[in-house]
Amino acid sequence: MTSQIFKNSFLVIASLLIAMLLSEMFFRLFLPQTFEVHPPGMYAGDQEVGYVLTPGFKGTIRRAEFEIPFQVNQFGLRGKEFRSPRPNTFRILILGDSQAFGFGVRDNETFSFQLEELLSQHYVNHDIQVLNCGVPGYGTVDQLAFLKSRGLLLKPGLIILQFLSVNDFQENRSAAGEWAEVQDGVLMVKTDVLDPEHSLPLWRRLQDWLKSNIHLARLLSDRLGYLAMRWGILGKMESFWGEDFSEEDAKITENYLLQIAEGSRKLSAYCIFLYTTGQVHVFSDTHTKLRSADFMEVTARKADIPWINSQDFLRNRTDKFDLYYRMDGHWTAAGHQAIAEILFENIIKLNLIPEVNKTTLQE
């Protein structure tokens, strides 16, 4: 009896392995998934920040849902070359990660580009320049390093920090200068620098490896993850487990945010914290205030600067299901447009752009 059970179990496991192997071969041949989304040469090493966008680079970002060309200007920022400052110039720096960078949208579809268009139409006497300083993979710690090393050169009048509740707490555990290295234009992780306290759990590392190497795993992860989110499963899981950041993570992140606010003051610039979340928190039928939103509210109060809760704005839009790519999770062009509108309304309401006097215009 025991021998028969063993044989049956072996046959079942062997059949599953063969089915998975055949499925993997099928997907590799006829429906290959995209793993390397960052084109080689996109990144360059940097002593102050760890890595930056390569000045003058042009490339294409590819995922299952999009294939988007982009360019980097000579200063190392996404988009067109920016104009030299004039007496009526007002510059806005957007600090952020891949959401701010504009993963999945064209240069002229990013919220930084669209915000510049909106503000230029409203402030006709100004030379409004919105500079997209977003870089994929950056946490708050890296945005702070970027501001310290480039802020004085860029001469901002307003700094908008885009904060992503999904992963910024975790990314702030180690600065890019500690874990990142660029080899032949490809961003790599230094395998010998992440101590056990700051590294991901084994199951997460296994999951990431499968998604980065196995076509079937990538396909199932993307499709099933989206369905789980739309059915409310992910929201219920998070309500049960809570958001994935500790009190220590919050303390470290608060310190970086306060330093960015203080650094803005030293540059004589206003500052706004833009709080953003993943699509599950926008799509969910039930709405409970997130711990990370409470954290941002308290931190902004300590810094004595305004903050914008984009989750509340996006949840109330009738087109909210069109604002994110279903599987990739980044904002679509419609999502970037919504963020630009949110920022535009708040900049106007808070009166953050000073009037230009006649003397300045004559200069």
Image (cartoon, rainbow, N blue to C red):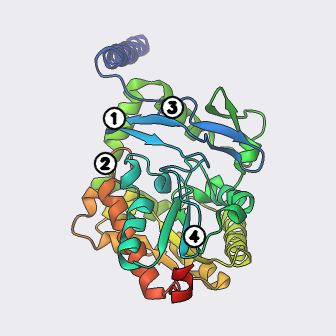
- The answer to which of marks 3 and 4 sits earlier in the sequence is 3
Residue 196 visible in the current orientation: no
Q: CA distance from mark 1 to mark 4?
A: 43 Å
Proximity of marks 2 and 3: CB atoms separated by less than 8 Å = no
Give the residue at mark 4.
86
* Residue 326, numbered circle: 2
SS type, badge 1: loop
Q: CA distance from mark 2 to mark 3?
A: 22 Å
Residue 305 visible in the current orientation: yes
Which label lies toward us, 3 or 4?
Answer: 4
Looking at this view, is 189 or 239 the one in front?
A: 189
Q: Amino acid at mark 1?
A: Ala
Q: CA distance from mark 2 to mark 1?
A: 10 Å
Which label lies toward us, 2 or 1?
Answer: 1
Which label lies toward us, 2 or 3?
Answer: 3
| Crowding at mark 3 (Cα within 10 Å: few <14, some 14-19, many 20+) | some
Which label lies toward us, 1 or 4?
Answer: 4
For residue 225, what is the image quadrant?
A: top left
In the displayed structure, 190 sits above or below 288; it is above
Q: Amino acid at mark 4?
A: Arg
- The answer to which of marks 3 and 1 sits earlier in the sequence is 3
Residue at the (51%, 73%) spot, across then down: 293
Looking at this view, is 319 or 59 the one in front?
A: 59
Looking at this view, is 346 or 17 the one in front?
A: 346
| Crowding at mark 1 (Cα within 10 Å: few <14, some 14-19, many 20+) | some
Residue at the (49%, 25%) spot, across then down: 213
- The answer to which of marks 1 and 4 sits earlier in the sequence is 1
| Crowding at mark 2 (Cα within 10 Å: few <14, some 14-19, many 20+) | many
Q: Position of residue 159 (x, y in %)?
A: 59, 70
Q: Amino acid at mark 3?
A: Pro
Give the residue at mark 1.
64
In the displayed structure, 327 sits above or below 38; it is below
